Image: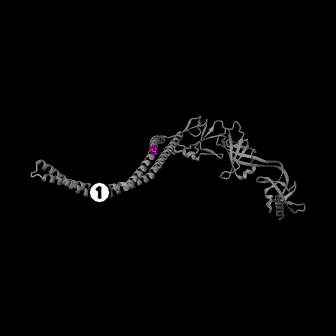
Amino acid sequence: MRYLLCIITLFSIHSAVADEYTVEAKAFHIETTLEAVFLPEKSEPIYISPNEWGDYTINSLVDHGSTVKKDSLIISMDSRDLDEQISSLEKSITTEALKLEQTQHELEQLNITTPRTLATFQRNEQEAEENLDHYMRIQQELDINTAKRSVLSSEFYLASQKEELEQLLKMYSEDDKTEETEEMILKRARYYVERAKFSLKTARINTERKLNTDIPRKLESIKRAADKSRIANTEAKQKLPRDIQIKQQAVAKAAKALQDNQQKLAKLKVDRSMMSLTSPVDGTVYYGKIQHGKWKSDTARKILRIGGKLQAHTTVMTIIPTNSPLCLYSQASEDKLAGISTDAKGYANTKLNPHQRFPVTISSIASYPSTKGSFLTTIAPTLPADLKIVSGMQAEVKIISHVIDKAIQVPVDYLKQTSDGGHSVQIKLADGKSSTRKVKLGASNSKWVVVTQGLEIDQVIIK
């Protein structure tokens, strides 16, 4: 029983001591671990940016990891369909150019002939109106009088022939015997009388027709001609200028179509030049792209094969220039930012030799997060000559920051948060009681926090 009480007493003393901490000044630092990848400072992405053409089927390509020279072929594609379309478009352009030239010529002719034609229609209307006016004021009455006078003339002629026949009969009747010559003269005179009768009959019929039919019809005909000329002139004033506008639009449309096809042809020829991709520099071929400090090759592995199709604006290869310096790139999460800063130093190691460390310095930290909330961090390594690093290899980086030789620091689990958002600790007093003391904090790591104000060395704090 006494043994058990000793054990309990010792356990209580140990628990009391474990919940106390004597404040002291000692070295402090923050060690931040980052996962990083080696990538070149400079690289040349390989992709296509076509304007029109969309079918880029791979015929041949170099292997991943191949060493290439500048301007050497790295990807070739099937251009037969594109060549056929270019040829067809060139022929269409030739035809369209001829049609445009013809349409322009037709427009030029319209611009010349239209004013003349409009003047002709205007003149025809004016002449028709003048003809109608003249006929109604002068010619119609003249035609009526002329028709009537033809009957009077025929009547006068008949009367003259009758009188002449009567005179001959009187003259020849005085002789008891009519001579043969006289008979011939009388015969002729009687014939003239008959002919004059017929002429009078014809004149009466013709005059009646002229007065009742021909002259009214002539008036209506002249009126219709005037109306027809007026209508034709009105239509011409509307139609002919509109015909010019239509032809102008046809010229503009043909010119636009020709221009569009010429531009399309130029773009297709540029697209044709992308059927053979060459290396812009001497270097090594990597399938995939380098983006935001990462090497991504999933899309490239699906595309880069014989018969595969390149997608526009998609990097499928990256040429790493020969002797390009390597950098380390890391995506630092928000909780890492407190422990890293530009020019901060540390060390790194690789899987090639986990025990071989080499110094590193942070070159830059992005001022904005990526879409995943991490911050791109660039790290400059000082590589040993015997460490054969290539792009794509991984490294574990440790950055040492906030180094303080002597810092008053306490375990983080001794802190309590105050109602105003600050922090406090419980100080053990000489009489065994405790007192709350507000403190100001500085840098911290997962276990310790630096106290910049509120505590002194050798003070004892309790939980």
Residue found 27% across the figure and 57% down from its top: 207
Mark 1 = which residue? 148
Residue found 73% across the figure and 46% down from its top: 398
Viewer-proximal residue among 370 and 60: 370
Main SS, magenta region, reads: helix
Q: Which residue type does callout 1 highlight?
A: Lys
Q: Is residue 336 above or below residue 352?
A: below
Residue 33, horizontal then vertical, whole percent? 72, 48
Residue 372, horizontal then vertical, whole percent? 66, 52
Q: Is residue 48 above or below residue 369?
A: above
Considering the numbered disc 1 on the image, is that residue within a helix, a strand or a loop? helix
Q: Which span is picked out in magenta?
A: 108-112
Viewer-proximal residue among 22 and 7: 22
Residue 400, horizontal then vertical, whole percent? 76, 46
> Is 143 displayed left or right of 255 in the figure?
left
Please say which color scheme the image uses: one colour
Residue 210: say if magenta: no
Q: Name the quadrant of the C terminus.
A: bottom right
> Is 398 displayed left or right of 174 in the figure?
right
Q: Is residue 59 visible?
A: no
Residue 111: say if magenta: yes
Q: Residues within 10 Å of mark 1 (few under 14, many from 20)?
A: some
